Amino acid sequence: MSKILDITNLQVDLLTEKGIGKAVRGINLTLEEGEIHGIVGESGCGKTVTAKSILRLHDEKKIEYRGNIFYGTENTNLLTLKEKNMNSFRGKKIAYVPQNPMTSFDNLYTIGEQIAETIREHLKLSKKEAWQRSLELLEQVGVTPADKRARQYPYEFSGGMLQRTMIALAISCNPSILIADEATTALDVTMQARVLALLKKLRDETGMAILCITHNFGVVAEICDTVTVMYAGTIVESGDVGTIFHNSKHPYTQALIKNIPKSTTKREKLLTIPGNPPEITDKVEGCPYAARCFYAEDICFHKVPQAKEIEKGHIVSCHME
């Protein structure tokens, strides 16, 4: 496999009511062809900002990007492209499934019309060809009978059906990368399992790479090959899923894994992490997790830990390693 996405030293500054906030503080991340890579961490850690930065979906009057986001074997730097050139990547080469499909569709148009419009915009097909492609996509993601569903409006769909339809829309132009941002958050357990199985099936059938944004380590265990753990805009640990689950080294990663509910009849009290993560406008010296860490020493509060590869592919940012 070869790299399809290579993020180097990405820094994202946001304009907030409290001043300039550092949402992402210099991260490095790679995605291989056909890989499912998870980015996990609590709310506000920079997961979604990172995902949206890849396609530059923010209001660029209120944001500043630094670093590089290279796409494909030709190493196209997405952060330096002009807006008109960036549009050729959005949807066609890199697709994005947002957190809330309820707000992603227009209730004035049928589901089929909205999928077909996207197809015609990027693939230049006729109305008839685009409509037929829409039906095939709905069938592919299990929204059936497709001919009937395509003529319905978004408000006639359940949350799970809308999520699968959003995935159909995202893959309509055969992208090489699918970014799934909290794709199962608002779904019940049964529907979560169906959506995760669908994502894995699409990867196996098409070979597309998937970047899976989640706060749920259970999702990571279910479908991801590799995982990056984020905290306060930084990457604290990354590696293949088996290594992270069974040999994690960073205290934050360990705490997250200990908090995964176990399917036992015995009621166990979950470990809580004391304190709160820093605000994005806070000046952070040293390790951003130090104030909440059980193992922190003086150096942790004054010196930023450097990322170290402790074994092949397993990278940790911690002074204790």
Image (cartoon, helix red, strand yellow):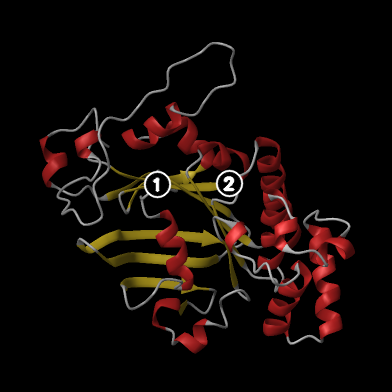
**In this picture, residue 231 sits left or right of residue 38:** left
Q: Position of residue 260 (x, y in %)?
A: 49, 29
Q: Indicate which label's residue lies in the foreground, 1 or 2.
A: 1
- Rendered location of residue 188, percent (x, y): 65, 38
- Vertical position of residue 219 compared to residue 45: above or below: above
Q: Is residue 235 above or below residue 151?
A: above
Query: In the picture, which quadrant includes the C terminus?
Result: top left
The answer, for residue 312, to whether it is visible in the render is no
Along the viewing direction, whichever of 69 and 180 lies nearer the viewer: 180
Name the one closer to the observer, 227 or 73: 227
Kindly identify the residue that appears in the image at 75 percent across and 64 percent down: 153
Q: Residue at x 19, y 37 (%)?
A: 291
Report which quarter residue 139 is drawn in. Answer: bottom right
Q: Quadrant of residue 78?
A: bottom left
Which residue is disc 1 drawn over? 43
Q: Amino acid under label 2? A: Cys
Judge left or right: residue 84 versus residue 172.
left
The location of residue 189, given as percent across then percent down, is 65, 36
Percent position of residue 310, x then y: 35, 42
Q: Residue furthest top?
A: 266
Position above or below: 206 against 263? below
The Cα atoms of the two marked residues, 1 and 2, are separated by 20 Å
Q: Secondary structure at mark 1?
A: loop
236 relative to 112 in the view: left or right: left
Q: Residue at 41% x, 33% y: name it.
A: 256
The dot on residue 120 is: none
- Residue at the image point whose x is 13% and y is 42% from the top: 301
Q: How many residues crowd mark 1 within 10 Å: few (<14), some (14–19), many (20+)?
A: few
User: In the rendered image, which residue does mark 2 sit on?
Assistant: 224
